[in-house]
Image (spheres, coloured by chain):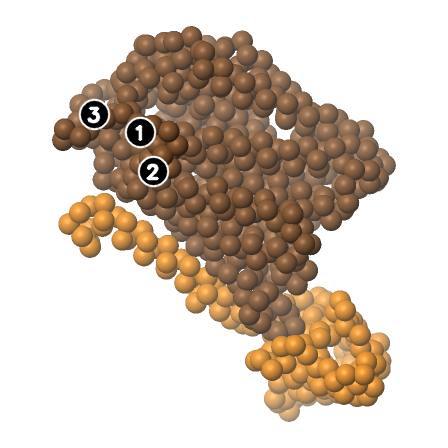
Amino acid sequence: MFRISKNPTVDTVVKLVTVAVAMFAFVFVVLVPLYNVLCTALGINGRGAGEAYTSVQARVDTDRTVTVQFIATNNDGMPWEFNASQTAVKVHPGATNNTVFFARNPTHKAMVAQAIPSFSPPRAAEYFHKTECFCFHQQPLDGDTSAELPLQFIVDLDLPDDIRTITLSYTLFDVTDMAKGSVANR
Amino acid sequence: MGEHHHGPAKGITRWLFTTNHKDIGTMYLWFSFAMFILGGSFAMIIRAELFQPGLQLVEPEFFNQMTTLHGLIMVFGAIMPSFVGLANWMIPMMIGAPDMALPRMNNWSFWILPPAFLLLASTLFMEGGAPQAGWTFYAPLSTTYAAPSVTFFVFCIHILGLSSIMGSINIIATVMNMRAPGMTYMKMPLFVWTWLITAFLLVAVMPVLAGAVTMMLMDVHFGTSFFSAAGGGDPVLFQHVFWFFGHPEVYIIILPAFGVVSQVIPAFSRKPLFGYDSMVYATASIAILSFVVWAHHMYTVGMPVAGELFFMYATMLIAVPTGVKVFNWISTMWRGSLTFETPMLFALGFLVLFTIGGFTGLMLAIAPADFQYHDTYFVVAHFHYVMVAGAVFSMTAGVYFWLPKWCGRMYNETMGKTHFWISFVGFNLTFFPQHFVGLAGMPRRIPDYALQFADFNMMSSIGAFIYGSSQILFLYNVIATIVAGKPISDEKVWEGAEGLEWTLPTPPPYHTFETPPKIDPEHAHS
């Protein structure tokens, strides 16, 4: 076996310390990125709907109707008014649809928000394509102002037959403090 | 060479500066017992609050701190250091080595532990109180919603992780390089084998825990978003990282316990251990499998079905090597000339109760059923059957087994047996009813409960007080043995005990095996 030192104890210690340091590094350079890569690749935790989707011109399946429900929730301590203009829409797979969310900052100071999506059933995430979404960017709002937040989406033609209703839930987080830092990429 | 035959130094400096494996082992054992009493007293507060429905004794916030500290102190302060203490005492004597391979590091790995737990206990008196997120400290409970003391908790975990890693490196270096000539790997006593494998697990996963708490620290103080959805992170990531450490951790706790039982049962059956080779392979298989089953702790987070199935089957696979072990222990006793001294009673208590804990573990491994059991008292009952009746009973068996050897005095057998029966009854009275309330839906970590759970909870609390107070009897018995036990001088304290440690004088001198012993090929492992 490969020896680092002639002294067997030193040899064992050096190898084991290397393993321990490598395992510490493993958490940061393997486990965390791997988790994000896997979630995106498999569409877990709503991550499949991460980036803006470039629509390909395809047919619209008018024979099939899917209900899409919208839920808007504030994260703990978030003071904004936040709601969906429509609670549910009926759409055809393949068609481009538009809806609007409404947000108002009732405080007297400028704030920044970030909406985080979540799907039910979770496996619907990879069949729900957003061509435009307010959740792609942080949303700054001055005090006492409001905004309409657009969402444009296409339900994939390949949506499994047993899914008839998709619930899209947005949770609005106050990210004013971390807005200077890097932006969420979803 | 002439320097070798000195005894211990005098006074407090003996303990502060000692590099002797027996001294350090003793300190580990006493420290872990002190932590066992501290963690146990927190459990008494929990059971007192749960004696009746409603809130009567403590505030819910304080209750959460108690469940958190109870778990952390029992796992990291009581069970783990106690087996490290046993390893320090026994491994050199079992493999014919004069001491551990790295005696000065050994001193350090013990002495950084008391400050770490002092730090953890001191958080109770800080503003906002102690950590309250449970011993699993899931984010965001441990980040966004944590008390300011979480920073001290993180530092404590870093220190005790360092201590565990140093202790493990020491054990591996000792076992790999300091065995007496002729003591091949497959002649080592099973306790040494289980500890060798445990030490490898510790070196592999303690850094992962350190990584998890470091990410927590960065989320709390340095504006990162590893576990914060708002910044693009994910709280579920915490659970994956934690259980990637946490599942091997539960085997880190139970494997040395298997080792102790594998020494005790043959001694009181007056037969060699049945299936020694298969015991070694089973231990190694359990250790390897422990790395691929972690997500069975988190079936309810919304994993894809393929993931649930993989983790379910992988988890159930662990029942095979574990079953091999239980089979071998029973076969060891088959047609043996059994006697039932206190160590054997605790080993048998371990065998029966650990197997019950193993079966409830199989129930929990079934992903669809786990959705019902998840986070209920059924889980609490399960892991106390494997942690208390598994690890703690085995540890107690080990103490009664080797204490006469260590101090050259016999403990009081009647008191020992009394201790066992009170523990056995108290333990089962505490945790068996928790299976029922758990299946009926009582959630864990909540200071109040619905009225229909009242009777079983009262039984649980009475059992806990019985089990808790039986430890005072244990403490008294150990001190009475050390101070005024009946002196013994037989090298073999127990008629059926086999192994190198029983060839040494009783009590063993301060330095042993300065010249390596000759290994009798017939009687190497017991």
**Residue that appears at 59% across and 46% down:** B122
Q: CA distance from mark 2 to mark 1?
A: 9 Å
Find residue B22 and report its image quarter: top left
Disc number for residue B17: 2
Task: Please give the residue where the numbered disc 1 appears in the rendered image.
Answer: B9
Find residue B437 and report its image quarter: top right
Q: Position of residue B526 (x, y in %)?
A: 32, 21
Whether discs 2 and 3 lie on one chain: the answer is: yes
**Residue that appears at 14% across and 31% down:** B1
Q: Position of residue A124 (x, y in %)?
A: 68, 71
Q: CA distance from mark 1 to mark 3?
A: 12 Å
Q: CA distance from mark 2 to mark 3?
A: 18 Å
Q: Position of residue B517 (x, y in %)?
A: 19, 24
Up the image or down, B303 lies above or below B436; here it is below
Q: Circles 2 and 3: CB distance less than 8 Å?
A: no
Disc number for residue B5: 3
The 10 Å Cα crowd at callout 3, few under 14, some 14 to 19, many 20 or more, is few
**What chain letter is assigned to the residue under label 2?**
B
Q: Under tag 3, what secondary structure?
A: helix
Amino acid bearing label 1: Ala
- The chain coloured orange is A
Amino acid bearing label 2: Phe
For residue A58, say whether it is visible. yes
Specify the colour of chain B.
Answer: brown
**What chain letter is assigned to the residue under label 3?**
B
Q: Position of residue B78 (x, y in %)?
A: 52, 36
Q: Under tag 1, what secondary structure?
A: loop
